[in-house]
Image (spheres, grey):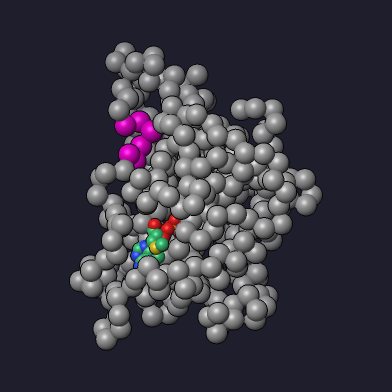
């Protein structure tokens, strides 16, 4: 970790439509070369008006050039961890599987259904001689979500008409929901969309995995702020989702997401510095790594020390 970055505790991952944040001064770009390659894009180290630093990473790269299945999530999470980050606030554009989750609304899910197809490297331990089984029953950082909930709700309640006028109604925040992560890049069929509803899915995207799993392996707090862009393809007599429909809502959602980030980041940095909101993640991997065996190669341990120096240095 470079001394320059020592105080960067919060990393923001921007998804579709969210390629920068507001109210920040760009200090520099960093592009850490991790054992898993380079991140999606150089990471912007920015200062809030108080001088507090945060890091911003565009998930789909500069100019949205990386499709969901090819996002280098291991490099992204490892690069953020190498900067000293403790918590990630990730944003994502999602489809709604429920009538009451309307386009323009915000959702902070607490569960995930994995519908990726095994083509994305999903573990830092993959390809090494070290075996680990991270606990993932609660895939998001519970305390972090609890901390964010009231603050995000307040921002939405206070949003001016101009900020949500493209949707014609005040955006709501929904919590305690389940997100389905599909492979893509094509959207779901109508039958799949209906099936996800039967499974208990509330929203759907193509990006939360393996990002959330890797954050857990790296012992980072991870919360997702999902913004609804469409009703996917389950509604009878309505047309199925298209990219054009998604893009219509994307920009207004991104504007409000930037407003949320600008409002919460300072206090979130403080909370992360105190350690109050991240008690579950730190140290969790010590119970997940299978006991050391003579078969573990020193070069693998060296590689893993990049994300988990406490166990592999
Ligand atoms: C642009 S529609 C599908 C695309 O949008 C979402 O991206 P992100 O999660 O990065 O905001 C979704 O996951 C798909 O990747
Ligand atoms: N309907 C949808 N399915 C998957 N990912 C999405 N991102 C935005 N809308 C989506």
The image shows residue 228 at horizontal and vertical percentages of 45, 70
Q: Residue at x 41, y 53 (%)?
A: 208
Q: Residue at x 38, y 20 (%)?
A: 300
**Residue 231 covered by magenta stretch:** no
Q: Residue at x 45, y 63 (%)?
A: 93
Quadrant hosting residue 96:
bottom left
Quadrant hosting residue 298:
top left
The image shows residue 311 at horizontal and vertical percentages of 47, 24
The vertical placement of 119 against 84, above or below, is: below
Q: With 53 as the anchor, is 44 left or right in this view?
A: left
Q: Quadrant of the N terminus?
A: top right
The image shows residue 141 at horizontal and vertical percentages of 50, 51
Instruction: Determine the quadrant in which ligand 1 lies.
Output: bottom left
Q: Would you say the magenta stretch is mainly helix, strand or loop? A: loop
Given residues 301 and 207, the one toward you in this image is 207
**Residue 120 appears in view:** yes
The vertical placement of 2 against 220, above or below, is: above
Magenta-drawn segment: 121-126
Quadrant hosting residue 296:
top left
Given residues 13 and 223, the one toward you in this image is 13
Q: With 82 as the anchor, is 49 left or right in this view?
A: right
Given residues 275 and 240, the one toward you in this image is 240
């Amino acid at each position: 970790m470079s001394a320059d970055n020592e105080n960067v505790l919060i990393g923001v991952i921007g998804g579709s439509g969210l390629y920068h944040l507001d109210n920040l001064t760009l200090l520099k770009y960093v592009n850490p070369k991790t054992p898993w390659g380079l991140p999606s894009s150089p990471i912007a180290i920015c200062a809030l008006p108080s001088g507090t630093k945060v890091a911003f990473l565009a998930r789909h790269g500069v100019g949205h050039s990386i499709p969901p299945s090819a996002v280098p999530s291991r490099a992204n999470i490892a690069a953020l961890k190498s900067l000293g980050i403790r918590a990630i606030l990730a944003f994502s554009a999602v489809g709604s599987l429920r009538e009451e989750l309307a386009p323009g609304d915000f959702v902070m899910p607490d569960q995930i259904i994995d519908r990726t197809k095994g083509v994305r490297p999903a573990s830092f331990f993959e390809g090494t001689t070290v075996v680990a089984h991270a606990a993932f029953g609660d895939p998001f950082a519970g305390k972090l979500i609890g901390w964010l909930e009231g603050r995000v709700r307040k921002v939405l309640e206070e949003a001016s008409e101009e900020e949500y006028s493209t949707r014609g109604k005040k955006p709501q925040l929904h919590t305690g929901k389940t997100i389905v992560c599909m492979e893509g890049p094509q959207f779901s069929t109508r039958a799949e969309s209906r099936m996800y509803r039967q499974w208990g899915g509330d929203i759907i995207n193509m990006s939360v995995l393996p990002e959330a799993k890797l954050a857990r392996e790296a012992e980072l707090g991870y919360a997702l702020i999902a913004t609804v862009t469409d009703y996917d393809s389950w509604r009878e007599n309505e047309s199925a989702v298209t990219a054009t429909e998604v893009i219509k809502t994307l920009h207004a959602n991104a504007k409000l997401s930037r407003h949320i980030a600008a409002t919460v980041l300072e206090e979130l940095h403080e909370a992360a510095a105190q350690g109050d909101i991240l008690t579950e993640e730190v140290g969790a991997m010590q119970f997940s790594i299978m006991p050391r065996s003579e078969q573990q190669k020193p070069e693998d341990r060296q590689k893993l020390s990049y994300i988990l120096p406490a166990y592999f240095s």
